[in-house]
Image (cartoon, coloured by chain):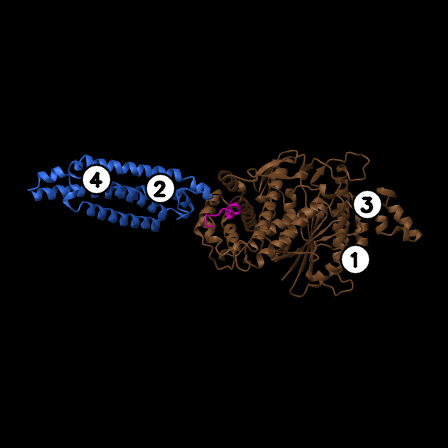
């Protein structure tokens, strides 16, 4: 079995991991992925949101893997096996997924590199490379590296050298798992611009390359593959109100990216760090009309390019994909039309991979909508005798113990599904409104779900309707997944078909779903937008 | 859908047999005829028997046609429901208005058949009013019951909440 590791570096890396996690939740990807986040700014809103999602997904597997309510992931979906949450998520450090290169809350570069203990010649060199005072040497690292990748690289390298937080040790452990018949695939996600991502992406890639190439251990290079998704500048933000503020400015992004690309060109020519490198860009910037240097206020909405990067991770983790030989041609994928972004623009290996992804993502979104707005409220509707009122629930939830475990499982599942809807709605809302020229977002349409949203307040996100009428659910459900290339509208299953199917179904399948798991599996299965078999 | 319609047919046949049996029991003796007719044909039992037989025949036809109407209208409702795709119980329940509308149509049909079979044929002049009323009420009850049971057993499960009290049943 292949060990797959996904590491998001910085805020953008965290958002790519977030998109990848939702694809995993939908059932796409390998059977297990170890997920980690790297950011100096532990309070960063993007990182915090993804960290919560990782923990929720780990909890989801715990909730539904044992106990009274179970989902059976061991058999195929054609036999009633669960697809939802099929991919097991493990935190990078076991109980923790986040690596903070410098643990000290008051850390500065001068402190991290112990300037006061440096010999005279090293101190002169240090002073020459980094501006003195709060501009660079004494800049607090609590809010990340503020777009100064050279500070981040130096600080991160120092932490790796001293193995602060155990990243180096854990990576070595993972690399050691590579054997003759067992590959280790490590995928890094980050941005070429900004601070943490720009600093951490090449630094970590080189560190992993060093570890797999030997170090003190036996070389495992042949069985450890490293890939990365590198985001070119795709979003902009307002400059800080104080022009003297020691933070990165929007105008610095492109020159920074250019320098970084020159660096990568040099790096890749001299040091074969990556087997596969995916670079993703966008022609028009998504404009974030605010400036937050870091901490929890920096909570950017998800954007379409991050989904493309997440698809790149899927491509790399696909066991059948093999890295091209050295000097292999560069593969280019682009949108068919600059004004739209649809399923056909997602760079899947084959059309059948794309159709299957569309089916599973569609199934997840439709399940989330139907579960939150129809199934969850119906579970509380009881007859005079205290039994479930809805006839279909009586069959599908038969044998569920509603007093033990189930209340907690229900709350957590509902929260996770609300998160799915929030993510999809935010991507839809901000992707269509944040570029200068309106983008037609043709993956899904969550307009029927959206209650409030302000493009000038991206950190607030999109408010979703608390309750929806049958007609609202019906129209939103049927229009949720957009049809383009591959499937015809004729084959599309509506909410009525779902309800008809769950009324016919008794939840009896070959799969060993148990308790409320039978209901979850049945609703999820009935929420499939179309009939598409997994790609062979 | 066909097995469910077959089930509905079975329900209607059973209730039709019950209706005919009840009417046969109600009209078994000459007491079901009006006293004036009985007195007038006291010495002519053949004619009295023929008149009673005609009246009973009209009563039974009334019941049979009412139940046939119930079968047709319940099948109509089931076929409408078959094409309806509710997304939840609430939306399915909201279709109970058309179920009730067809039930009213069935009641109207019952009275039209009653008018044709009893009044237009002057059966009401020969048969005891009490027998007609009791027989009619029983037929009406069985017809409504047949419509209810027929729609209940034949409607697809997703649309069952549209049949009143069906989820409770």
SS category of the residue bearing label 1: loop
Residue A221, position as x, y percentages in the image: 72, 61
Compared across the picture, whether A211 is left or right of B46 comes to right
Which residue matches tag 4?
Answer: B130
Q: Chain of mark 4?
A: B
Q: Nearer the viewer, residue A535 or A175?
A: A175
Residue A428 lies in the magenta-colored region: no
Q: Which chain is blue?
A: B
**Mark 2 and mark 1: Cα distance apart in space:** 74 Å
Q: Nearer the viewer, mark 3 or mark 4?
A: 4
Quick one: which residue is furthest to the right in this view?
Answer: A120
Q: Which residue is mark 2?
A: B77
Stretch in magenta? A374-385
Mark 2 Cα shell of 10 Å, populated few (<14), some (14-19), many (≥20)? many
Q: Which residue carries the number 3 mark?
A: A140
Q: Chain of mark 1?
A: A
| Chain identifier of the brown chain | A
Badge 3 and badge 4 in a common chain: no
Is residue A259 visible to us here? yes
Q: CA distance from mark 1 to mark 3?
A: 21 Å
Badge 4 crowding class, 10 Å Cα cut-off, few under 14, some 14 to 19, many 20 or more, is few
Circle 4 sits in a helix, a strand or a loop, which is it?
helix
**Chain ID, mark 2:** B
Residue position for label 1: A163
């Amino acid at each position: 079995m292949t060990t797959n590791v996904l590491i998001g570096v910085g805020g953008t890396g965290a958002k790519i991991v977030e998109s990848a996690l939702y694809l995993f939740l939908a059932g796409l990807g390998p059977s297990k992925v170890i997920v980690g986040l790297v950011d100096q700014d532990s309070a960063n809103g993007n990182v915090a949101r993804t960290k919560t999602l990782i923990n929720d997904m780990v909890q989801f597997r715990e909730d539904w893997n044992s106990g009274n309510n179970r989902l059976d992931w061991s058999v195929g979906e054609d036999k009633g096996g669960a697809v939802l949450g099929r991919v097991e998520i493990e935190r990078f450090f076991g109980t923790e997924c986040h690596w903070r290169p410098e643990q000290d809350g008051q850390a500065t570069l001068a402190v991290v590199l112990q300037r006061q203990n440096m010999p005279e010649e090293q101190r002169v060199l240090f002073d020459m490379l980094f501006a003195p005072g709060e501009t660079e040497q004494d800049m607090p690292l609590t809010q990340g590296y503020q777009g100064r990748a050279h500070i981040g690289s130096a600080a991160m390298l120092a932490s790796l050298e001293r193995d602060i937080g155990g990243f180096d040790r854990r990576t070595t452990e993972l690399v050691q798992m590579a054997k003759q018949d067992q590959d280790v695939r490590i995928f890094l996600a980050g941005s070429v611009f900004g601070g943490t991502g720009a600093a951490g992406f090449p630094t970590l890639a080189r560190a992993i390359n060093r570890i797999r190439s030997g170090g003190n251990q036996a070389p495992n290079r042949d069985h450890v593959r490293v890939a990365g998704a590198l985001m070119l500048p795709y979003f902009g933000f307002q400059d800080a109100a104080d022009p003297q503020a020691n933070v990165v400015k929007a105008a610095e992004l492109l020159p920074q990216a250019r320098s970084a690309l020159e660096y990568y060109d040099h790096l890749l020519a001299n040091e074969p760090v990556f087997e596969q490198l995916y670079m993703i860009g966008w022609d028009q910037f998504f404009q974030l009309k605010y400036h937050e240097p870091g901490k929890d206020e920096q909570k950017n909405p998800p954007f379409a390019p991050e989904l493309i990067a997440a698809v790149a991770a899927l491509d790399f983790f696909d066991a059948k994909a093999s890295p091209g030989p050295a000097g292999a041609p560069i593969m280019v994928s682009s949108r068919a039309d600059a004004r739209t972004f649809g399923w056909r623009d997602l760079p899947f290996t084959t059309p059948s991979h794309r159709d299957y992804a569309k089916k599973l993502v569609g199934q997840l979104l439709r399940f989330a909508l139907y579960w939150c707005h129809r199934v969850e409220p119906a579970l509380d509707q009881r007859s005079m005798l205290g039994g479930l009122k809805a006839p279909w629930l009586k069959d599908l939830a038969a044998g569920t113990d509603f007093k033990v475990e189930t209340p907690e499982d229900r709350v957590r599942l509902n929260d996770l599904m609300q998160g799915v809807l929030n993510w999809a709605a935010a991507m839809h809302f901000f992707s269509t409104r944040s570029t200068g020229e309106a983008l037609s977002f043709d993956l899904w349409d969550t307009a029927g779900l959206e209650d409030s949203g302000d493009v000038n307040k991206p950190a607030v996100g999109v408010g979703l309707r608390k309750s929806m009428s049958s007609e609202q659910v019906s129209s939103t459900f049927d229009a949720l997944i957009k049809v383009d290339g591959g499937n015809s509208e004729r084959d599309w299953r509506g909410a009525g078909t779902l309800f008809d199917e769950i009324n016919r179904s008794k939840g009896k399948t070959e799969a060993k779903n148990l308790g409320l798991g039978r209901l979850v599996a049945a609703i999820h299965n009935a929420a499939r937008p179309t009939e598409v078999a997994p790609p062979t | 859908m066909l097995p469910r319609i077959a089930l509905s047919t079975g329900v209607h046949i059973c209730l039709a047999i019950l209706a005919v049996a009840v009417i046969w029991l109600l009209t078994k003796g000459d007491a079901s005829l009006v006293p004036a007719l009985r007195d007038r044909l006291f010495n002519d039992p053949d004619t009295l028997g023929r008149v009673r037989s005609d009246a009973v025949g009209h009563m039974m036809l009334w019941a049979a046609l009412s139940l046939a109407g119930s079968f047709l209208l319940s099948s109509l409702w089931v076929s409408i429901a078959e094409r309806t795709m509710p997304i939840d119980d609430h939306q399915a329940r909201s279709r109970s208005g058309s179920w009730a509308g067809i039930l009213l149509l069935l009641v109207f049909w019952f009275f039209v058949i009653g008018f044709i079979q009893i009044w237009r044929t002057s059966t009401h002049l020969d048969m005891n009013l009490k027998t007609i009323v009791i027989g009619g009420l029983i037929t009406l009850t069985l017809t409504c019951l047949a419509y209810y049971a027929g729609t209940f057993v034949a409607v697809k499960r997703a649309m069952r909440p549209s049949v009143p009290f069906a989820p409770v049943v």
